[in-house]
Amino acid sequence: MFFRENNPNFIASFDFYKIELISFCIMEDLKKYFLGQFDLYQIDGNLFSEERQINFDKLKIDSREKEVLVSVLKEKNATLDEVKIITKGLRESLKEHNLNYYERGVTKIPDYDYDVLYKILKNLEELINETVPTSITQRIGFNPLKDKGKSKKKYETSTKYFQTFDHLFKMYSLDNSYSKEDIDDWELKNQKNLGLTNIEFVCELKYDGASISLQYVNGELFQALTRGDGNSGEDVTENIKTINSIPKKLIGDFPSSFFVRGEIVLPLSGFAKINQERLEAGEQVYMNPRNTASGTLKLKNPLEAAKRPLEFLIYSVIMDRSINVYFDNHFESLEKAKKWGFNVPYQSKLCKSSNEVMEFINYWNTERHDLPYETDGVVVKVNNLHFQDELGFTAKSPRWAIAYKFKAEQVSTKLNSISYQVGRTGAITPVANLKPVQLAGTTVKRASLHNADQIEKLDIRVGDEVFVEKGGEIIPKIIGVDFSKRSLDLLPTKYITHCPECHTELVRNAGEANHYCPNFYGCPPQIIGRIQHYISRKAMDIEGLGGETVALLFKNGLVHNYADLYELKVEDILHLERMAKKSAENLVNGVQKSIEIPFESVLFALGIRFVGETVAKKLAKHYKNITALSQASLMELILVDEIGERIARSVIEFFENEENQKIIERLKSYGVQFEIVEKINPNATEKFIGKTFVVSGVFAQFSRDELKKTIEDNGGKVGSSISAKTDFVVAGDNMGPAKLEKANKLNIPILSEEDFITKLNESE
């Protein structure tokens, strides 16, 4: 056995083990990457005089990740010494990648690959109790800590590590749109929620850079945080200070404390110059301006960061609304920022309607190619700040802003073959296997072909030169064929007629794009897929049981549906390959613990077609238990909020199936939750029953969510917009004038916060 220290392609050789971005299962990726590590080291005689065996029964397997790694160790019959050789190799490799990223500004593997390799190393070190002080898993200089509140310092110097801090105002992502229809729909929703028809918008170019949040205190730059996960970011203040377009001291009349958000971008000319210098020096060129800008912010040496001609383009000013006396709308805030010394892009424009928005988008979709920076779209925002407050946020994005994405990057490559995959619902998905090609900074080997119609529409044939696009989607897709390069001997693609797994003849329902394998209870990928869905985190969340183990159980005849899981005993599974006693006990205990999972998650876990997580919650809340749901008629289901005919028919078909009925009865007998357990609120009443409230504005004693919950706890319903069906409007500060006008026009009683509290305390 020997370590490939002398292989010049050691780092690059990880490319051989890259998992395409279309992989959906992190556990499968962990296994494949780990298996790849064994192939990086060769067995060439005994390196050690005595091979030390691993005592699997003493390993602490406290996560699914460790379970996967241990299964590989058993499969490979690995010794402790082999594992230590692998951890040594991973430490050296990841250290090199960190040097590339943080100090050299180069990325030789995608972030995803790095993260998986890091997980493997960290879990292996924990499994074999190996603590190496210089390991990448121990050194915070390379792995910034999310140390919230432990240090009283504003930040640690970048020569040590980047400290992590919470964002006082969360940095949200934006919903994406790709058409005029999307923009029109978004405008209509805003009009409906605000109760008015004339809304001003601000259009800004969406620059392709690294988001940053800058805090200014008493006119001086205090702190700069990266976007991070939106809730917290890394302090890169020292590197930010090297950017000339970021003012260190402000001018004019400015707030005592506020934040500005924007993009750190690398101009195309600067990017070209950097790459030219690297070429001349014999160094590898950078992939794109965005990654280079982002990497520069993470350089530990500010002097190195200063060598790169980064620029800052502001897109918002944020402060506590209660102390904002500087502006009333977003466009005005940008004008103020310009006077304070910030670099505000001149392209921003005030628009009166979605038609004007589209004029702006169409213009810059062409003209953007003459800009000095990379852009990938346009951001559209509601201008009025009070309206922004009124519209609020979803969990992920503001309702008052949307991003229109320009046409995605495209490349051409050869279509080598077409393969077909079977999903848990029986849906057949054709996959294009491509000659590897670089696209948007990643290597693409596969792309989606969607369905038979798409293949026929584009006349895609094996051997064609095809155009591949990667836009807002994670999975690349084929959008066309280069017919000028088509060989005359290429034959039209004939879509498969039988399931590639069980060979059952495929069916295609009227009005549906996909072909399906109807062998619902006999096709292995469907059976395995349904059980894997059942045990997944958002469903039954069964600890100790992963996708690979489900496949193993099925192949050994131990499970044929998810009800069979509850009859598994430790002695039944001990004989399985890679199954130690502790793992078997964890699996059985995890299954038994799943009976505590609430009804709405159980309903999602059943895998009813078209019933996703949100629909399952709505159905569970409406019907309260599985019996009532199973007896509901088509019309009754359709009348449930947001349940259409397609979902309703699927629910009825599921419960009419005798096999499903038997499985549900078995699950009931095992104690699985099939009804909602109502949480009793001692203060709840029915005094608002039959009444609909609309909540608008900012309140002193309640948050908006608390106010809405109070209404619902007392039997009332909360509406999203004012209509003739609204009984009361609860109005706080900064209530939108359009809503106020509409409420008055409809003679709807308007309650202040104090009025609402009084009404709440009235006796029934």
Image: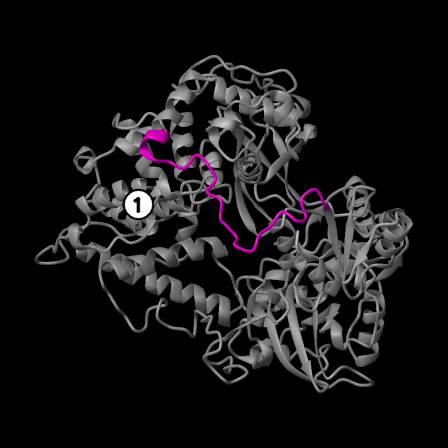
Pointer 1 residue: 544
Q: Does dot 1 land on a helix, a strand or a loop? A: loop
Residue farthest toward the top in the current orientation of the protein: 505
Q: In the image, which residues are magenta?
A: 667-691
Measured from the top left, where is residue 312 in percent x and y? Answer: 71, 71
For the N terminus, which image quadrant?
A: bottom left
Find residue 738 and report its image quarter: bottom right
The x and y percentages for residue 468 are: 62, 38
Viewer-side residue, 638 vs 539? 638
In this rendering, position of residue 28 left or right of residue 292:
left
Q: Residue at x 57, y 75 (%)?
A: 236
Left or right, residue 132 beside residue 524: left
In this view, the residue in front, 456 or 22, is 22
View extreme (front): residue = 763
Residue 519, percent across and down? 44, 17
Q: Is residue 560 visible?
A: yes
Amino acid at the residue labelled 1: Gly
Q: In the image, what residue occupies the spot 30% across and 52% down?
A: 66
Q: Is residue 90 left or right of residue 713?
A: left
Residue 297 vertical position relative to residue 591 in the rendered view, above or below: below
Q: Which residue occupies the foreground of this view, 446 or 760?
A: 760
> Dot 1: few (<14), some (14–19), or many (≥20) neighbours within 10 Å?
many
Chief secondary structure of the magenta span? Answer: loop
